């Protein structure tokens, strides 16, 4: 190419570049017209951490601007979320050690922290969808998602505990239960238990492809739920695997899952995309605590611009195929959309 004369540039314009992708990016309104992926508050699910008490807000050091909230404050947060157009909240209880035991007894207490909060939210803000986590770890003295015996995680005995927990959450008024334990066969077992107890309308959002990830660290700080011994690699998936994620989602859909989830999200966009192409139910992605903490930390150092990074990440998750995204950024992003 010759850059020396204007005539050679003209001949490039006229002849060689009939197709100019930049024309579709020329103005903001044209960019709006051709944008392929939308992100709205309706795509977001807002995870919230609960603690006992009244008008309490307790900081989570590794998750700046996220708090453990008492039930009355959760109700307020649910009200705000609803006003901002966020359709759902996901609740995670943080319990004191005295309430934890081997078999997660507290998880079926009808007057437990989670059950009480679900009832309060549903009576104050009935329009918001309440999603509850079905897993033993917040209630387990071992900090695992399954029953531990001599260092092994027992699958089938765990299913009974999970089913009882799901029924208890449905009785409290949960709209959707979300098993996050990764035991085999839990979706079918929970589905049958719900149906047999008159809860055929309660949905299941399955954490289907949940990886044994180091991105959950801040969440485990928030709930003080880290495993006391060992790791979660015998039930959560190996980050190296994608085909196995498809096996998991297909099994869950067959067992009655209404929605499936890939977790974490940011480092697993290829998995989200493959899952989307494989199942015909809505696909959720969990923008997990470690992904949130990385952005917050860099923003606090002045190294990244938090808001635009959050929107770019969430948009990328939708582009990859996520229909729904659980994110700790839900409120701040929705606030920005509402002006
Ligand atoms: C456990 C559970 C975890 C998360 C959601 N449910 C942690 C784990 O599996 O150890 C992590 C969410 C996050 O990191 O934001 N049932």
Image (cartoon, rainbow, N blue to C red):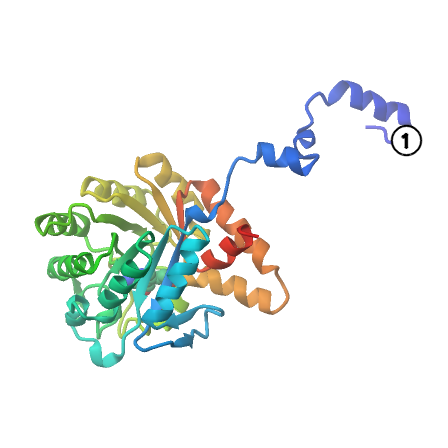
> Which image quadrant is residue 159 in?
bottom left
User: Image point 41% across, 75% down: which residue?
Assistant: 57
User: Image point 16% across, 58% down: which residue?
Assistant: 171
Q: Is residue 216 left or right of residue 21?
A: left
Identify residue for label 1. 4
Q: Secondary structure at mark 1?
A: loop
Q: Is residue 324 left or right of residue 198?
A: right
| Residue 10 x %, y % | 84, 23
Can you say whether 334 is above or below 293 in the image?
A: above
Q: Nearer the viewer, residue 339 or 65?
A: 339
User: Image point 11% across, 49% down: which residue?
Assistant: 198
> Which image quadrant is residue 272 in?
top left
Can you say whether 50 is above or below 90 in the image?
A: below
| Residue 71 x %, y % | 32, 70
Total numbered badges shown on the rendered structure: 1
Q: Residue furthest top?
A: 15
Q: Residues within 10 Å of mark 1 (few under 14, many from 20)?
A: few
Quarter of image, ligand 1: bottom left
Q: Residue furthest front?
A: 124
| Residue 220 x %, y % | 35, 69
Q: Is residue 119 something that shows in the picture?
A: yes
| Residue 44 x %, y % | 42, 50
């Amino acid at each position: 190419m010759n850059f020396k004369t204007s005539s050679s540039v003209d001949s490039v314009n006229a002849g060689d570049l009939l197709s100019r992708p930049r024309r579709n990016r020329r103005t903001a309104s044209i960019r709006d017209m051709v944008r392929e992926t939308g992100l709205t508050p309706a795509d977001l699910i807002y995870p919230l951490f609960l603690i006992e008490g009244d008008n309490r807000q307790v900081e989570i050091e590794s998750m700046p601007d996220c708090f453990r909230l008492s039930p009355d404050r959760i109700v307020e947060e649910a009200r705000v979320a609803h006003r901002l157009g966020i359709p759902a909240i996901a609740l995670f209880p943080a319990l004191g050690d005295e309430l934890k035991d081997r078999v997660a007894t507290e998880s079926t207490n009808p007057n437990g922290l989670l059950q009480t909060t679900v009832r309060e939210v549903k009576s104050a803000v009935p329009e918001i969808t309440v999603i509850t986590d079905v897993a033993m770890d917040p209630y387990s003295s071992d900090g695992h998602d399954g029953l531990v015996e001599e260092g092994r995680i027992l699958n089938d005995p765990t299913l009974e505990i999970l089913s009882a927990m799901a029924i208890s959450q449905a009785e409290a008024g949960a709209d959707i239960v979300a098993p996050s334990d990764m035991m085999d066969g839990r979706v079918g077992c929970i589905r049958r238990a719900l149906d047999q107890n008159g809860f055929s309308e309660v949905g299941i959002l399955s954490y289907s492809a949940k990886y044994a990830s180091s991105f959950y660290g801040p969440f485990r700080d928030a709930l003080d739920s880290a495993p006391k011994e060992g790791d979660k690699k015998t039930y959560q998936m190996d980050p190296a695997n994608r085909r196995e994620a498809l096996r998991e989602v297909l099994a869950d859909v067959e067992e009655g899952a209404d929605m499936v989830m890939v977790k974490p999200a940011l480092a697993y966009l290829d998995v989200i995309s493959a899952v989307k192409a494989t199942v015909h139910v809505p696909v959720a992605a969990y923008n997990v605590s470690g992904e949130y903490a990385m952005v917050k930390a860099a923003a606090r150092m002045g190294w990244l611009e938090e808001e635009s990074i959050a929107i770019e990440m969430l948009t990328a998750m939708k582009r990859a195929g996520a229909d729904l995204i659980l994110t700790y950024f839900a409120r701040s992003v929705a606030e920005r959309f509402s002006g």
